[in-house]
Image: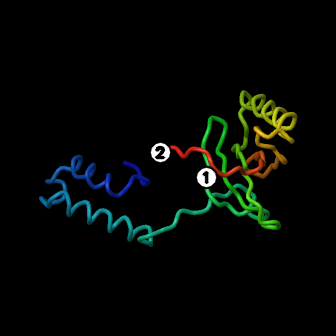
Amino acid sequence: MGCCSSSSDSGAKYEASEPAAAGGGKPASSQTTTTKKSAAAASGSTAKKPATPDFGLQATHDVVKLLGKGGEGETWLLKVKDGGEEVAIKLIKRPIPKPALAVIKREIKIQSDLGQGHMNIVSADEVVLSKTHLGLVMEYVPGGKSRP
């Protein structure tokens, strides 16, 4: 059970894994409540909103949401601060491993050769480089299937 587990699951797992004698004979449910309260007090806040990821693009873009994850990186929906348009950016954490570098170069080349003007391929607009990430900026096409 990690810090990101859901509250409905964590109580059941905690009760099953925590011996009743460890907390001075208290029932497992009160131990769970006490532990959650003390953890919240230690963090200084009971309800914290997740922090916006830092990709080094705050000056030009606002992060909207995560669109998907893959073998190379994550694709995020970002909003351009100047024009307000939404773009999808595939972000790859730097430093890029050597084996992945050839794959990424090939993807950028294919996108630039085929993407512009083809109605069935998302067009790539630019490649951005921040201190922490390499990003392939593409047009955002809403829709598609959402995965459970």
- Tell me: 30 left or right of 80: left
Describe the element under mark 2 as helix, strand or loop: loop
Q: Depth check: 17 or 8 in front?
A: 8
When asked about the image quadrant of residue 42, the answer is bottom left
Residue located beneath label 2 in the image: 148
Please report the residue visible at 87 percent of the width from the left and 34 percent of the height from the top: 113
Mark 1, residues whose alpha carbon is within 10 Å: few (<14), some, or many (≥20)?
Answer: some
Q: x%, y% of residue 145? A: 57, 44
Instruction: Single out the residue that lies furthest toward the front.
Output: 119
Mark found first going from the N terminus, 1 or 2: 1
Measure how far apart labels 1 and 2 are at the Cα level. 14 Å
Tell me if label 1 and label 2 are in contact, CB under 8 Å.
Answer: no
Q: x%, y% of residue 26? A: 14, 61
Residue located beneath label 1 in the image: 66
Say what amino acid the circle numbered 2 marks: Pro
Please report the residue visible at 54 percent of the width from the left and 46 percent of the height from the top: 146
Say what amino acid the circle numbered 1 marks: Leu
